[in-house]
Image: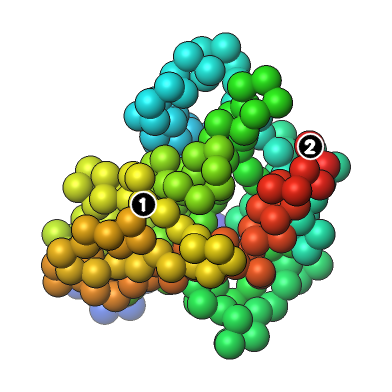
């Protein structure tokens, strides 16, 4: 092998075989370096991504009036909900990977098209939630929601006040929508448009996105990004409905969620 390589190197530089071979060799070495670097840095990239996500949630919670003092006292709880039963699960949230659960056929449920309003195909059987309580009173419920936008999956946190109906805050922490259009779901103007809006009228979810929003159930649409705007509404409808957190929220209202 070594002698064959030496003979290859001894070829004239103008030899087409040598030129193609050297190009292939350099490409292979570069590919190995890139692959090795990606594998080495993957834990750091994931750590940074999770840290950024945690920072976005913290900023969202800090923006809710009257919550910061409770947070200073360590008042946020991380729990896992069994979405089928609507009760708190015994699964340890410390190492729970919700994205992996959603992709695992043994830990997720395939959604029929008629029920898949968020266009996510599969729904994990268990989900993280976060609670802020003052004594026995729920002050804030934070739910992770996701759904299809125009050209990406939009992932967000939806924070509801203790009445489980009024939006305390909404923030998108991951998206790949069109820059300058759909990507504006991350901007303060869109986020703030959710604050104080209501979700339910009785058992019916009424929240919607419209141009010139002014009503209790209306969120201002992003101009030029109707698909992205509707996508955020659709995912909230899905995740607060019967195939998402609906059973848990019903149990929470009745004091039967297993807290």
Q: Are marks 1 and 2 in contact (CB under 8 Å)?
A: no
Q: Give the number of callouts.
A: 2
For marks 1 and 2, give the one nearer the viewer.
1
Of label 1 and label 2, which has the lower sequence position? Answer: 1
Instruction: Spot the residue most to the right.
Output: 90
Q: Quadrant of residue 20?
A: bottom left
Q: Is residue 156 among the parts visible in the rendering?
A: yes
| Chosen colour scheme | rainbow
Q: Mark 1: few, some, or many residues within 10 Å (few <14, many ≥20)?
A: many
Which numbered tag is attached to residue 143?
Answer: none
Q: Which residue is mark 2?
A: 259
Residue at 73% across, 72% down? 109
Residue at 40% across, 64% down? 207
Left or right, 133 with reference to 61: right
111 and 20: which one is in front? 111
255 and 53: which one is in front? 255
Q: Secondary structure at mark 1?
A: loop
Q: Quadrant of residue 221?
A: bottom left
Q: Which residue is mark 1?
A: 197
- Residue 213, compared with residue 114, is above or below; it is above
Q: Position of residue 180 (x, y in %)?
A: 14, 59
Left or right, 14 with reference to 198: left
Q: Position of residue 12 (x, y in %)?
A: 25, 68
Gap between marks 1 and 2, in whole Å? 27 Å
Instruction: Spot the residue most to the front.
Output: 202
- Residue 194, compared with residue 94, is above or below; it is below
Q: Secondary structure at mark 2?
A: loop
- Residue 203, compared with residue 49, is above or below; it is below
């Amino acid at each position: 092998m070594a002698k064959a390589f030496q003979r290859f190197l001894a070829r004239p530089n103008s030899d087409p075989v040598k030129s193609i071979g050297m190009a292939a060799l350099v490409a292979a070495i570069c590919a190995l370096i890139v692959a090795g670097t990606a594998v080495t840095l993957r834990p750091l990239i994931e750590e940074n991504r999770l840290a950024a996500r945690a920072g976005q949630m913290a900023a969202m919670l800090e923006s809710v009036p009257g919550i910061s003092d409770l947070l200073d006292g360590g008042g946020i709880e991380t729990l896992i909900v069994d979405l089928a039963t609507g009760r708190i699960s015994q699964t340890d949230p410390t190492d729970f990977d919700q994205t992996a659960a959603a992709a695992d056929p043994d830990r997720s449920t395939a959604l029929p098209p008629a029920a898949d309003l968020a266009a996510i195909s599969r729904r994990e059987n268990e989900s993280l939630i976060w609670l802020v309580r003052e004594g026995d009173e729920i002050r804030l419920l934070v739910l992770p929601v996701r759904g299809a936008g125009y050209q990406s999956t939009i992932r967000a946190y939806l924070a509801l006040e203790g009445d489980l109906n009024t939006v305390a805050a909404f923030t998108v922490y991951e998206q790949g929508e069109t820059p300058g259009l759909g990507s504006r779901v991350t901007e303060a103007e869109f986020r703030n448009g959710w604050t104080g809006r209501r979700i339910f009228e009785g058992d019916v979810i009424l929240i919607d996105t419209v141009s010139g929003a002014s009503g209790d159930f209306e969120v201002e649409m992003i101009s030029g990004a109707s698909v992205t705007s509707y996508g955020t509404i659709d995912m909230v409808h899905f995740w607060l409905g019967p195939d998402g957190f609906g059973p848990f929220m019903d149990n929470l209202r009745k004091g039967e969620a297993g807290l």
